[in-house]
Amino acid sequence: MQAGLGAIGAAMLCSLLMVGAPSFAQDSGTAEPTQAQAGTPQRYPETGIAILDCDPGAPAPDDSCLVRLPPKTLRNGLRASEEASFTFARPGAEQFPEDIALSATLLLVDVTPGLNSARRATFANEKALLRSFVEGLPEGESIALYTFKEDLLRVVDFTTDHNDVLVEIDALALTGRNTLIAEHTKQAIDILDRKSDVLLKNVILVTDGQDEGLDSIAEISAAAIEAEVGISALGMAWRGFGDAQVGRDENFLRRLTDGLGATQMVILRRPAEATTAVTNFAEDVSASRRGSGLIVPDGEAQAADIILELREPEPGVEGEYQTNEVRVRFVPVAGEAAPETQTPSEPAQVPEATLFGVPILWAYIVAGLLILLALVVLLMKRRSHASDTGTVDDDIDIDFGSESDADFAADPDDATQIVGGTVPDKTPSAFLVREPDNARMPLVGQRISIGRGSANAVILNDVSISRVHAELHRNRDGGYSVTDMDSLNGTFINGRQVRGTLPVRAGDTLKFGEISTKLVLP
């Protein structure tokens, strides 16, 4: 009977599926395409960071398109289709919003000395070239200067006073051991992502290109695209011309900036060529800024195609360019004008699917009832057989549970063993209260590590915090001492820098880098 039931159920299931598939396809139909689906896309390219975006997010104003030219790409022409009229607006123009900036650049400078400190021999020339690059950027460009080795350090926050940046470039010194390029590029992207009043956000990476971190280029590229942050690189090659490592470093930087910006390699042991390379790169970056801006409609916004003619580098051919015309669709926030009203036609009637002349829904219901009835009959027969013979057929294993499963007792052997017979005390003995948001961070145990790394007991996620920044010790008398773990930006008690280990009392202000906290008791 079981085999017969299985055959009947399988036959019913196959029949129902064969009838149901066409019904699903007919029901799904094909939706009328929207303007965005049927017409021109609203951004170019459609993936990655857009060069021309007629659906930009904040802080771009409504009813505008954003032109974002990467380095080495020029804008040859700009026009609109149909009868619409538009203006290309840059900062200072009446149509450009006063409360936003066009662009901001974060200079991310590698200060590790290289293998056997070999970079020291060319670092003075490197700083002079970096100065010339900053001097070549457009006036009014907001610039920040960060350096990195094992950790990231903010040297100059975003400013339009380029002299502040130049002074700090002159004071740069090589230090540290590990070059974590990808990791700190990701942190630079996060910093720029938080600038909500800037349209174009850019990282200029200054490094030899030899990465010693674990972060992948794919992760960095995805983060940059999501935050719409461009990445370009000045590859400062301190090794000799023709060194195989220079080629590997250049390849790393080109992969890192692919689709996000441009890479310019600089051979420092060839000073004249190095100066020319940096000067040309600064001009490429400045030209891309001059060619970027907002496209805004004149008067009432009307839907139209925006056509942008670009002069782009020829892929794989150094110094060669090609002209490319791109077209995107501008659609006002209110949407395109609705087409003339037409009398809607009656939708086509889809014949109702049937099974043996019975509507498909009733066929499903009847099939389900038949299967349920067969299972009940089969179960009753099995129980009757078990009563007569005192055995249960092993072919069917239907488990309805048992009273013993619900009425169990705890087994002493299953208890978690506590070594020493005591449970560790997880109650905080004190708290660090972060200023100014008064966030309370519990201190548990005898030794509490503090830093940016995820393995610390207290994690302070800030660029001024080292991976393992400091350590708090609970003394025998219940008080605390703090030890600075050779952090880059220091540890302070009430303004006094900690060198080695110093006692700290309840109510004292503990500052780690730029993060200020207060030690309080429960």
Image (tube, helix red, strand yellow):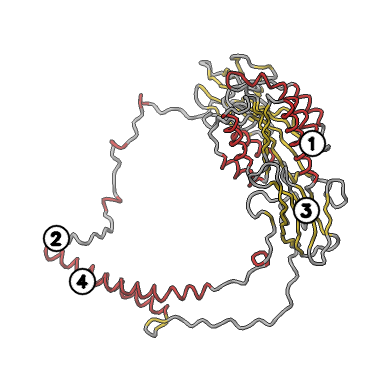
The residue mark sitting in front, 4 or 1, is: 1
The residue mark sitting in front, 1 or 3, is: 1
The residue mark sitting in front, 2 or 3, is: 3
Tag 4: residue type? Met
Q: Which residue is mark 3?
A: 61
Q: Residue at x 66, y 32 (%)?
A: 235
- In this picture, is 406 found above or below 121? below
Q: Residue at x 75, y 70 (%)?
A: 337
The residue mark sitting in front, 4 or 3, is: 3
Q: Which residue is mark 1?
A: 137
Q: Residue at x 50, y 76 (%)?
A: 26
Q: Quick one: SS at disc 4? A: loop
Percent position of residue 179, x then y? 59, 28
Percent position of residue 368, x then y? 35, 73
The span from disc 4 to disc 3 (Cα, nearest Å) is 73 Å
Percent position of residue 434, x then y? 64, 30
First in sequence: mark 4 or mark 1? 4
Tag 1: residue type? Leu
Q: Which residue is mark 2?
A: 391
